[in-house]
């Protein structure tokens, strides 16, 4: 399926920390705003999607289970095909893959892909209990919360702690990733945190759940993103700068080793990445930038390893040795990532690496533009299984030329 | 007590609707060994996504441990200073009542005295 579809437009709304003086926008408002930005970017209108595809990421603030159909209704689009992404931060990437397959089959020609959430506006399940619906039922409610698990940060801390036990990872190395992301955020007008910080600030930020610190964590925001994907034939008619999906790979519920006692230091990217490279027909050293799903700096580092940019266990040394800036030798999270950009909900942050990859390949990244970018990679990573990192891992390789 | 697959003998935790190894729905609950080895851990210093009453117990030490019968589970480790937790440490279960007849398993570092929990506490 190499190059069968291309992204022809994208949008990212401003994000909000829901401060008292700010206007209050609903998840539907953010969906429409993001869609408007993407359509404008593509020079298209909503009428272009009647009889075509609409893809919608799940949201904690979705007010119905039929979220994709309800969104079609809210947007007044008579979609032939609905795609729903429910794989957390992998949703944007998996929706692109599903869209590509439906386009390749000839069922439809194009898909408007949207995702938004307002996690800062979720009413708590009980007074004084700051729990979202996702944390107040199921496996987290029954087998994690009562056992002392302090949310996502604790869940990931186990992975980080085990990684440090098997390999090596110093806070100066994860700190470099955090500092680098914040540097890029100073060059991205939409990032929620744009004030640079130094490694010292990172090292002194308080420990939340050993070994994860405050400056290891993404700021939660309200916001939305969207993109438009079309067949390669239509893409050329729609835009002068199509960004082709050259290769993809997907892995869900990966066990590294046994099912009962897996090695949690290797993610499903190890399984997904070879498919992406095989489809794209590119070599690893042709990848000119890397947009991982950076929910924690150590996850960016593990992702780099599992993509094979370095040996397992060498990720810390790798980021230490490389220049991670947009004009360096391994541009990483050039939009500031979610670490400094913000995470607009558990299923929507995954749009950000994808949108940044497209932005770079269209030459629209302004002050943080990588010169001469022609091939790059982004990741989707989503869902927190019990005791392991990431339920879904998606590898995407894009290029602006076939 | 844990689910042990009637077909392949795999112990499953957290409880599953069929055996994650072989797919059998024959998953009776059996007595399990109340001991394991710490595979990873964290020391949480703030309460997050949880009841505020946990503030009283901070810092909270939670392990991800390999039960001797096979599956892996999260559990709070008590009776041990946070600095002395280590990967590979042997721990044994104790059961704290939560009220209404419910108990929650927690673990303590294994010592000679704690290595066999009295019967009736499982």
Image (cartoon, coloured by chain):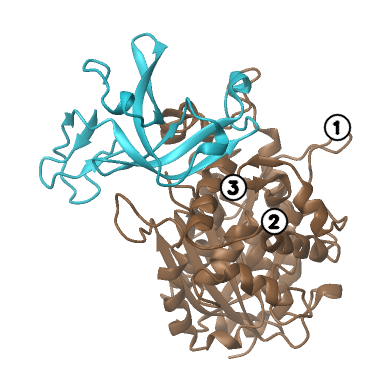
Chain colours: A brown, B cyan
How far across and down, in percent of the image, does residue A107 sit?
43, 71
**Residue at mark 1:** A20
Q: Toward which corner of the image does residue A310 lie, by quadrant?
A: bottom right
Q: Residues within 10 Å of mark 1 (few under 14, many from 20)?
A: few
> Going by the image, does A27 lie left or right of B65?
right
Mark 1 against mark 2, which lies toward the viewer?
2
> Going by the image, does B68 lie left or right of A360?
left
Q: Is residue B14 visible?
A: no
Q: Residue furthest top?
A: B100
Above or below for A13 versus A328: above
Cα separation, mark 1 vs mark 3, equals: 23 Å
N-term mark: 1 or 3: 1
Q: Is residue A137 visible?
A: yes
Chain letter of disc 1 in the image: A
N-term mark: 3 or 2: 2
**Residue at mark 2:** A338
**Residue at mark 3:** A346
How far across and down, in percent of the image, does residue B1 sit?
24, 28
Marks 1/2 in contact by CB < 8 Å: the verdict is no
How far across and down, in percent of the image, does residue B88 sit?
40, 46
């Amino acid at each position: 399926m190499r190059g069968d579809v291309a992204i022809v437009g994208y949008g990212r709304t401003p994000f909000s920390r829901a401060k008292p003086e700010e206007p209050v926008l609903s998840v539907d408002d953010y969906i429409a705003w993001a869609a408007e930005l993407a359509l404008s970017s593509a020079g298209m209108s909503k009428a272009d999607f009647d009889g075509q595809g609409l893809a919608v990421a799940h949201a904690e603030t979705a007010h119905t289970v039929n979220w994709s159909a309800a969104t079609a209704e809210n947007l007044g689009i008579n979609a032939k095909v609905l795609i729903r992404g429910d794989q957390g931060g992998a949703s944007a990437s998996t929706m692109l893959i599903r869209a590509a397959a439906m386009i390749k089959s000839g069922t439809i020609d194009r898909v408007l892909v949207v995702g938004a959430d307002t996690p800062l506006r979720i009413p708590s399940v009980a007074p004084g209990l700051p729990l979202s619906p996702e944390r107040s039922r199921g496996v987290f409610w029954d087998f994690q919360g009562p056992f002392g698990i302090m949310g996502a940060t604790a869940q990931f801390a186990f992975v980080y702690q085990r990684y440090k036990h098997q390999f090596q990872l110093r806070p100066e190395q994860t700190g470099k990733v955090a500092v680098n992301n914040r540097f890029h955020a100073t060059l991205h007008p939409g990032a929620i945190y744009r004030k640079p910080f130094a490694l010292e600030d990172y090292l002194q930020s308080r420990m939340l759940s050993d070994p994860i610190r405050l400056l290891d964590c993404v700021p939660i925001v309200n916001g939305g993103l969207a993109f438009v994907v079309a067949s390669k034939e239509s893409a050329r008619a729609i835009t002068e700068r199509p960004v082709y999906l050259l290769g993809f790979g997907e892995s869900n519920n990966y066990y590294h080793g046994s099912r009962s006692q897996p090695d949690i230091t290797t993610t499903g990217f190890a399984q997904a990445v070879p498919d992406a490279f095989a489809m794209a027909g590119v070599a690893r050293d042709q990848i000119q930038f890397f947009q991982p799903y950076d929910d924690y700096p150590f996850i960016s580092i593990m992702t780099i390893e599992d993509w094979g940019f370095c040996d397992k266990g060498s990720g810390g040394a790798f980021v230490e040795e490389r220049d991670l800036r947009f004009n360096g030798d391994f541009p990483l999270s050039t939009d500031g990532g979610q670490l400094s950009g913000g995470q607009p909900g558990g299923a929507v942050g995954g749009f950000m690496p994808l949108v940044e990859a497209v932005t770079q390949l269209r030459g629209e990244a302004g002050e943080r533009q990588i010169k001469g970018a022609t091939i790059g990679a982004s990741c989707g990573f989503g869902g927190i299984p019990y005791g392991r990192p990431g339920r879904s891992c998606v590898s995407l390789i894009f290029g602006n030329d076939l | 007590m844990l689910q042990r697959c009637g077909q392949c003998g795999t112990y499953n935790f957290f409880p599953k609707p069929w055996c994650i190894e072989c797919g059998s729905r024959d998953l009776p609950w059996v007595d399990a060994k109340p001991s394991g080895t710490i595979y990873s851990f964290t020391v949480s210093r703030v309460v997050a996504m949880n009841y505020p009453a946990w503030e009283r117990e901070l810092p909270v030490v939670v392990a991800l441990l390999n039960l001797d019968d096979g599956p892996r589970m999260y559990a709070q480790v008590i009776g041990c200073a946070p600095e002395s937790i280590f990967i590979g440490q042997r721990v044994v279960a104790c059961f704290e009542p939560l009220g209404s007849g419910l108990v929650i398993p927690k673990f303590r570092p294994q010592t000679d005295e704690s290595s066999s929990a009295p019967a009736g506490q499982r």
